[in-house]
Image (cartoon, rainbow, N blue to C red):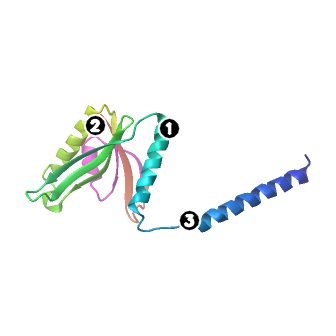
Amino acid sequence: MGQSEREHIFEIATSVEIETALEIETALEIETSPNAGDVELLYTRITESNLAATGLPAAEPISAWLRDDSGEIEAGIYGWSWGGTAEVDLLWVSESRRRSGIASALLDAFEAEAVRRACTQIVLSTFDFQAPEFYERRGYTSLGRVDNYPEGGWHTTMCKSI
């Protein structure tokens, strides 16, 4: 196959790729308020892909809550365990209950459940204004930092062996 023949085949392949990309681009819809069912479908498909790739079952949620007498949430922690790792996704304590040991109690409960599930590490992500020092005091170390996220701040992913 000569040089010009190869160039012609490349041009055809490139043309097909461009047409396909343009078709996809015109079909894409950016949504600022996605349908909950659509998001759930993504989770389902990713879980199926993860199972196919790893043989590991779906992640199992871990959560703990502190409610007042009327049932309103004053603090909570939420995450999951999967593949020997637990991940804290959300940890929140109401302003009026902060600095009272509740965050530590929630994290203790989460860590204990992770150990019960035979996890060997816990990961989480936090911003500079979300008390990363709290996690450092608890034995978490930063795996990496993204500066200027949000603008003027930073974001880090942290890990702790358990």
Examine the image and state in which quarter residue 37 appears. Answer: bottom left
Tag 3 secondary structure = loop
- Please rate how many residues cluster around mark 1, counting C-alpha atoms within 10 Å: few if below 14, some from 14 to 19, many from 20: few
For label 1, the residue is 52
Residue 27 horizontal side relative to residue 63, left or right: right
First to last magenta residue range: 123-145
Tag 1 secondary structure = helix
Residue 120, given in percent of the width and then of the height, sits at 33, 33
Residue 42, given in percent of the width and then of the height, sits at 45, 53
Residue 28, label in figure: 3
Residue 9, given in percent of the width and then of the height, sits at 83, 53
Residue 114 horizontal side relative to residue 49, left or right: left
Closer to us: 74 or 133: 74
- Sequence-wise, the earlier of marks 2 and 1 is 1
Q: What amino acid is found at the position of numbered circle 2 in the picture?
A: Ala
How far is disc 3 from disc 2 in space, using C-alphas?
39 Å
Residue 30, label in figure: none
Q: Is residue 96 above or below residue 54?
A: below
Q: What amino acid is found at the position of numbered circle 3 in the picture?
A: Leu
